[in-house]
Structures are given as structure tokens and as C-alpha cells.
Image (cartoon, rainbow, N blue to C red):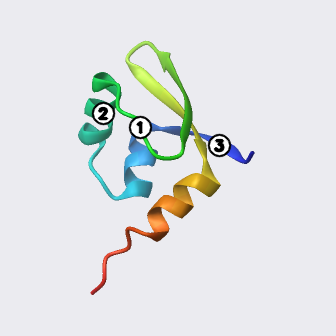
Amino acid sequence: MSTIKMTVNEYAEARGVGSSAVRKAIILGHALPGVTKREKFGNAHVLHVDKKILNKFLGGNKKVT
């Protein structure tokens, strides 16, 4: 598995959503696409993201202009 560590802001930017939406999803316990593990350090979260799963998810969600 090719997992990388990302902050909430980096993950939100990769998905094209706001960081507050990602934080709210974490608080509510929703599954985040590509995230295999979450760690909390104080108030900050570190997400372990599988790049293959995230890229597969993002491939189907491209905006057509």
C-alpha cells in the first residue's frame, strides 16, 4: 500500500473541498475516501491516505467545463 501522511488542509485541498468540511466529517465519524487511519495530536489530525484509492475516487469526480 502506498500510504502518505497528510494534514486536514492538504487532504481538503487534494479533494477540492473546504478544510472545515473534512473536520466536520471527522467529528461526525464519516468515512473519508482514501483515509486508512487517523491520528490526533492535540487539536490537529494527521490522516494516513492511500493515494491509489484517493486518485480512483477523484478520477470519477472531475468537473466538466
Q: Residues within 10 Å of mark 3 (few under 14, many from 20)?
A: few
Say which of 58 and 12 sits in front. 58
- Left or right, 50 with reference to 45: right
Q: Amino acid at mark 3?
A: Ile
Residue at mark 2: 25
Residue at mark 1: 8
* Residue 47 spot, x, y in % from top left: 52, 33
Question: What kind of element bears circle 1?
Answer: helix
Please identify, in this view, whether the residue under mark 2 or under mark 3 is nearer the observer: 2
- Disc 1 to disc 2: CB gap under 8 Å: no
Distance of label 2 from label 3 (alpha carbons): 20 Å
Classify 65 as above or below 36: below
* Residue 49 spot, x, y in % from top left: 58, 42
Residue at mark 3: 4
Classify 34 as above or below 41: below
Q: Residues within 10 Å of mark 2 (few under 14, many from 20)?
A: few
Task: Name the image quarter holding the N terminus.
Answer: top right
Distance of label 3 from label 1 (alpha carbons): 13 Å
* Residue 64 spot, x, y in % from top left: 30, 83
